[in-house]
Amino acid sequence: MSLQSVAQQMVAPGKGILAADESSGTIEKKFAKVGLTSTEESRRDYREMLFTSPGIGEYISGVILYDETIRQKADDGRTMVSIIESAGILPGIKVDQGTAAMDVSPEEKVTKGLDGLGDRLKEYAQLGAKFAKWRAVITIGNGLPTDGNILRNAQDLARYAMECQKAGVVPMVEPEVLMDGSHTLDQCVEASRRTLKILFDELTRLGVDITGTILKTNMMVPGKESGKKATPEEVAASTVQVFKDILPEGLPGQAFLSGGQGDVEATENLNAINKMGPFPWKLSFSYGRALQDSALKAWNGKKENVTVAQQVFLKRAKMNSLATLGTYTGEN
Ligand code: 13P
């Protein structure tokens, strides 16, 4: 399959991506919140529950996996990758190795994982990965983000994207302007605009094929501690404006992260955005928390809860599927 056809499939109409690539540390924290212990087996059982949801392929085009999961087998001996593939879904892989403080600006982050990336991508492609994800985080604060941090993250994302395409894997480039902080909607717009502009400049400079690339970024929202909430229409208007100004027409699509928005809120915002379409690119979802949190609670580590948890997960997947078409009308 060409990079272009994988990228198009990832953002097929009515479909989006499940981000299930939490590192072992992150999933341990998620599990702890609902009183569960994180072990290799409990992580496997949880993800198997999600991936075997009946009819998942109707709403989900791709799943982002963590290194452990792409090598794991389900209870019945099938590989997790084969379960995903048999549902008609593309397996993807997180290839960044988390973040570290930036030397010259320690309140900001850089992403680790470029060393040996080419070899790791080759192995992941052999294991079945059709796309990969690299997350860079941009922090808003006093005097932040700095131009230096934005540039460094854009350069690393572009390097990563180039390596992916060399290995025949579609890069999902993820610059996330964090919701953490008390900034305004306008500050989010300004930081996101600078970040995306420099990112696409760097991608072009390194010769990354935009038609075989997917963007994953944040919606334009005020900071979590700002005490302000923007309406879906306000979020949509600012997000669409930034995208229209910056995203190249050849880009197949962009799949939003949820970034700490509530699950219904993330659906409402995506729907309001797509109601403003059509656009030259698909605007879809690649949610972690907004697709999983309610299902994790419903599952609670128990076999007897699997069916109910799958229903809860499929409901969110379906609501977001409608939102990619701008036809979501509420929760029922
Ligand atoms: P959230 O939707 O929980 O932000 O996760 C998406 C993701 O993959 C972040 O890298």
Image (cartoon, rainbow, N blue to C red):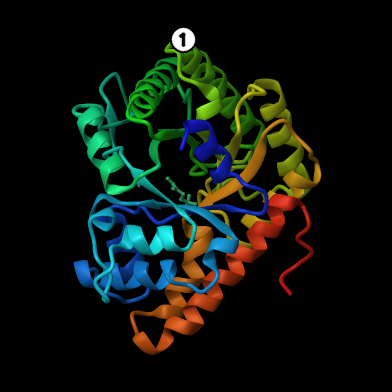
Q: Amino acid at mark 1?
A: Arg
Image quadrant in which the C terminus is located: bottom right
Q: Is residue 217 visible?
A: no
In the picture, measured across the screen, residue 95 lies left or right of residue 130, that is left
Q: Quadrant of residue 105?
A: top left
Q: In this rendering, is residue 225 above or below 43? A: above
Residue at the image point whose x is 57% and y is 19% from the top: 197
Tell me residue 136's x, y (percent).
40, 33
Q: Kindly give the residue lying farthest to the front in the view shown.
A: 1
139 or 200: nearer the eye?
200
Across and down, in percent, residue 254 comes to 59, 37
Left or right of 63 in this view: 123: left
Does residue 24 appear in this view? Answer: yes
Q: Residue at x 40, y 15 (%)?
A: 148
Neighbour tally class for label 1: few under 14, some 14-19, many 20 plus, Cα within 10 Å: few
x and y, in percent, of residue 61 in the image? 53, 53
The residue where tag 1 is placed is 205
